[in-house]
Image: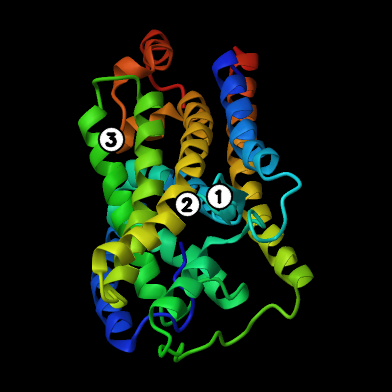
């Protein structure tokens, strides 16, 4: 891990934390951190009060808990694959240089 | 950037399905061909897909007070091009539509078009312009930022096309305000994360990157010189 990468990780943390600090202590009206998707849905309903969504999801997570379970699952699947790739190749390189 | 289930008139659903379908179909053919001709790229294909999986599950807070997620589509666009990225994006979006009710089956075509086609296209163009001119780490950062951000701009345009209202410009501004502005810091964060993964790939498997032709040998001097000194056949 180079210094460059550490600064980059700090940058990501800063970008994520800054909005939380900016909106700290504010009510639900400003900065509740709802989804942008839902905000777009509301905008559509405001622009076209007559528009009715003509199809609804076949299945919805029964609760926020289950939803976060599935989101965590999604992230975990991805992270396992990336971790495996990095670990496998790193070990292979080390093994190779160790044998010489 | 998901357009929610049912939030596009049937006409537009069909329109985006047809457009995306063509690209995804072509992508499936390209992907099969790539896996057959260069089976050694498979792990990297998995990593590119996995990266989209991880990033699109992270809903990050933004300066507008709402949350959105990065896409991870820039990395795949640079490595494998737009059609294959469209296939990977379809897998991610299907998972989210079926299991999380984020996005939808009816809006899948439109969502694939923004996250799998237009965003990656922007990333690929940025990459093409910068390739060879600056270090690939910085080029991939800018490509990832472009891919992520244009994905959301595309969503805004798609929604404006479907719901122009009385004043299409004002409508577009509204949707851009919701998606594009929220996305600015997230796109930058994605750019930074992508560099970290990119540098890791470059360090561990420069051979695949060279084979795919995304970088040239001047980028990995240590790797190619070690190949030359060990005079062949040591696999």
The local secondary structure at tag 1 comes to helix
The local secondary structure at tag 3 comes to helix
In the picture of the structure, the residue carrying the numbered disc 2 is B71
Q: Residue furthest right?
A: A65
Placement of the N terminus of chain A among the 4 image quadrants: top right
Which residue sits at x=30%, y=58%? B117
Marks 2 and 3, how far apart in space? Answer: 17 Å
Placement of the C terminus of chain A among the 4 image quadrants: top right
Which residue sits at x=47%, y=67%? B2
The local secondary structure at tag 2 comes to loop
User: Label 3 marks which chain's residue?
Assistant: B
In the picture of the structure, the residue carrying the numbered disc 1 is B55
Q: Residues within 10 Å of mark 3 (few under 14, many from 20)?
A: many
Indicate the position of residue B223 as horizontal and vertical percent values. Answer: 42, 17
N-terminal-most mark, 3 or 1: 1
- Badge 3 and badge 1 both on one subunit: yes
């Amino acid at each position: 891990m180079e210094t460059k990468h550490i600064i980059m990780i700090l940058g990501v943390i800063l970008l994520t934390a800054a909005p939380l600090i900016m909106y700290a202590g504010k009510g639900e009206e400003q900065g509740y951190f709802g989804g942008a998707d839902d905000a777009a849905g509301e905008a559509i309903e405001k622009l076209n009060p007559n528009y009715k969504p003509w199809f609804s999801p076949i299945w919805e997570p029964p609760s926020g808990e289950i939803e976060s379970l599935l989101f965590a699952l999604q992230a975990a699947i991805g992270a396992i694959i990336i971790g495996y790739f990095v670990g496998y190749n790193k070990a292979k390189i080390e093994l190779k240089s160790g044998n010489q | 950037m998901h357009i929610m289930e049912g939030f596009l008139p049937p006409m537009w659903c069909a329109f985006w399905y047809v457009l995306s379908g063509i690209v995804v179909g072509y992508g499936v053919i390209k992907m099969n061909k790539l896996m057959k001709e260069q089976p050694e790229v498979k792990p990297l294909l998995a990593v590119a897909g996995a990266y989209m999986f991880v990033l699109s599950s992270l809903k990050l807070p933004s300066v507008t007070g709402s949350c959105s997620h990065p896409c991870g589509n820039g990395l795949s666009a640079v490595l494998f091009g737009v059609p294959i990225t469209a296939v990977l994006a379809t897998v991610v979006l299907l998972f989210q539509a079926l299991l999380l009710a984020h996005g939808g089956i009816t809006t899948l075509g439109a969502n694939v078009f923004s996250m799998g086609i237009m965003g990656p296209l922007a990333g690929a163009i940025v990459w093409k312009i910068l390739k060879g001119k600056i270090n690939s780490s910085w080029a991939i950062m800018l490509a990832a930022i472009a891919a992520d951000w244009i994905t959301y701009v595309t969503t805004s345009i798609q929604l404006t096309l479907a719901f122009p209202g009385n004043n299409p410009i004002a409508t577009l501004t509204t949707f851009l305000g919701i998606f594009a502005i929220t996305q600015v810091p997230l796109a930058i964060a994605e750019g930074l994360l992508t560099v970290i993964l990119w540098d890791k790939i470059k360090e561990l498997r420069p051979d695949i990157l060279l084979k795919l032709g995304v970088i040239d040998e001047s980028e990995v001097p240590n790797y190619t010189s070690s190949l030359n000194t060990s005079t062949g056949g040591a696999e």
